[in-house]
Amino acid sequence: MRLLCLFAGFLIATYYSNAQNHVLSGNVRDSLSGEVLIGASIFPADNPSKGTLTDESGNYSLSLPAGQYRIRVTYVGYADKEQELILDKNTRMDFLLSSTVITTGEAVVSGKAGDEAVKKVEMSRVQISGKKLKSLPVLFGETDVLKSITLMPGIKSGGEGNTGIYVRGGGPDQNLVLIDDGVVYNPSHLLGFFSVFNGDVIDDVEVIKGGMPAQYGGRLSSIVSVTTRQGDMKKWKSSGGIGLISSRVLVEGPIKKEKMSLLISGRRTYIDQVARPFLPDSLKGNRLYFYDLNARYTWRIDEKSTLFFSGYFGRDAFNYLPPRREDLQFGVKWGNSVFSARYLRQIDSNWSMDASLSYNDFNLSSEVTFNNLVIRVSSGLRDWSTKTNFLYRSGKHGSIRFGTFYTFHTFRPGILNAEVSGENDVNSRINNQFAHEGALYVSTEQEWRTRWLVQAGLRYTFFNQVGPYERVLYESNGVKTDNIVRYGIGESIAFWDGWEPRLALRYLLDSRQSVKASYTRTNQYVHLATSSAATLPSDLWVPSSALVKPQRADQAAIGYFHNFLDNQYEASVEAYYKRMRNQIEFKPGAQLFFNQNLEAEMVFGQGTSYGVEFFIRKNEGRWNGWIGYTWSKSLRQFDAINNGEPYYYRYDRRHDISVVLTYGISDKWEANFVFVYGTGNVITLPVGRYVFNIGVNPDDLDPSFSVLDLYDKANTYRMPAYHRADISFTYNPDPEGLKRFHSTWNFSIYNLYNRKNPYFIYLDPDVKTGKITAKMVYLFPILPSVTWNFNF
């Protein structure tokens, strides 16, 4: 209670200290399409530190003392705009920005982007506009959100064939991935080669890996929030691309000019169809493909209110026919469905609100056919969520945010169906689980004595698992009993809650240098049950319960940020330390799939992660790009694993390097280059092997043997380092965009020098010599691709 009183007093002081200013507010949009520009910078030309950014509806609000100003507006890929005014009362001013034609030697990225990195209080944060995303290196003809953010320090890919991202020592389930406020539980397609985010529909991407503001929560490691485009408000147009691996098409335009717009986009891969004529008959039944659809309807009700409906639907499919086994077939399908409705309103010059309702469904199904027997198993997770957020802007750099969050979870652990010759012999279902999750938050941001900027927040979260459900009771030593507790509809099974304080500080050394620090506490109530890093999804999401405690983390970070050469270059170094509690692993040999009592297979422990991240980026000129380097350690400690001694987390990576370069060869040609290097993942390998004679094979009377591997400590071996170079060239025959029909060609090579990066290692015994050899499996060799992109 004392903490709440102190915080309320700070908010009141913030309000009254800023009451004597006037507010400049308005909207920033594209002059041709009428689309809002998210994250545009608006600031007094002679004092950029007093600026602000547009929100997701393109609105801004800037509170300044009365006086005469020259207001400047900047946005990546657009010409800057300035407007003079005398601010003697609350004033509204809208801006229309014109897209710039990027030519050789011209600025590719506005220097203001680097200026924001120094002046803003947020740290450990990456924001990429859709236009900037398209200027990043391209592979297979498409820009990709997940591939782009894993090139940033502190954010790692699990490697080829792995669909997760790993942020500052956290697991793949510890990232909250959103598209228009709807949760995406599996964000990847096609063995991790593509993300579910079609670059053509993206307006803005925000990644927060530390210093998480109070309006975000529910995950320990990061927030990845993707906002889709609203669609052209002035004319109908189409765009897309045709490539060797996939094709896509997008249609957008006004239903009512300047008021309502519609955007629809679709993608599909077809490499399985292209390759089929060249495969032997034994492999022609194998398939691996995905397709997805995006749609958004936007209604600009008036200059202060916007309503939009957004939808995403995607599916992956994999079918495998083992060679020389016509009697056996295996298939798996998985995908996400996400729908959201969102209302944004600028209530007045100070107040704005954002309310949303979303639905998401993740589904996974597997099917095995053996002769006349067909076995189908499915599982999934469904959420209904609502959010309300209010923002009060006041003062030189003052604001107050508060809001609510609520989700109703339905966990579907499994449905089993078996048929023989069309007759349903088995139809079994694991009990669904239900839970309520909610949060309340309040935060403030306030400038103090010019150089200091403070952002403080407090978030309260709760999680309530409810019936109907049947729970098996266990003894204190983990032995299952015959006792079952039955819960009725809505009856509380387990209740968890927690307070999450947030604090971020920025101190300006001068106009080009700053020091920042942050502290964040987070709670996570839903958990990913996985026993390996398998390519194909075999994962189950499980709730916190009477036995499964919420995961909790405390993270502290400090950083130094420096811009030089008139913002052409920006550099930073950040150090972080993260302590994680109630981490989850599974017992060796745990049965994860179709297990009514999955909780009994879990063990719980602690985690620690710390590291240093270095980043330098060139924002302007013919050459631009960045270099990122991370040194880090990630440890886990479980009483039931490794004799209770700490061990390296499976995705511990001591060194991680990324180099991203873009070069404007001429007006028509652009080259992109990417190089990545990472220390190999840690694995557990046996230190010995015992062979037992268990009898005689009755068919040929040869002796039969059983093999038992002997293990010592966990994760003591490292796989070879992962490194790869990619290159792409984009040809634009009409760089000034004068033709009605516009197209570009993209030529790319993935894994330029054909590096055999490890996917997994297995042991191959030689029966004759008795020797055992470790062999490495890799997935993707050098892969060239060409894509034709168009719009009209």
Image (cartoon, grey):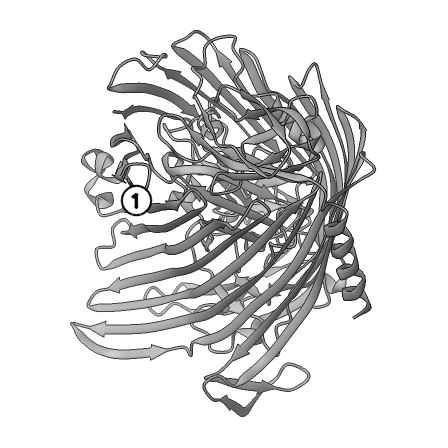
Q: Residue furthest left?
A: 422
Badge 1 density bin: few <14, some 14–19, many ≥20, Cα 10 Å: many
Count every numbered label the image shows and give the total: 1
- In this rendering, is residue 668 above or below 30? above
The one nearer the camera, 602 or 522, is 522
Quadrant for the N terminus in the image: bottom right
Residue 222 in the image: state x and y as whole percent. 60, 49
Helix, strand or loop for disc 1: strand
- Residue that carries the numbered disc 1 in the rendered image: 289
State the image quarter where residue 125 is shown: top right
Residue 450 in the image: state x and y as whole percent. 80, 34
Tell whether 12 sits left or right of 304. right
The reply to whether residue 522 is in sight is yes
Residue 15 in the image: state x and y as whole percent. 72, 51
The reply to whether residue 614 is in sight is no
Q: Residue furthest front?
A: 88
Q: Residue furthest bottom?
A: 483
Quadrant for the C terminus in the image: top left
- In this rendering, is residue 21 above or below 620? below
- In this rendering, is residue 338 above or below 26? below
State the image quarter where residue 789 is shown: top left
The one nearer the camera, 727 or 719, is 727
**Which amino acid lies under the numbered mark 1 shown in the image of this protein?**
Tyr
Tell whether 639 sits left or right of 724. right
Residue 185 in the image: state x and y as whole percent. 46, 55
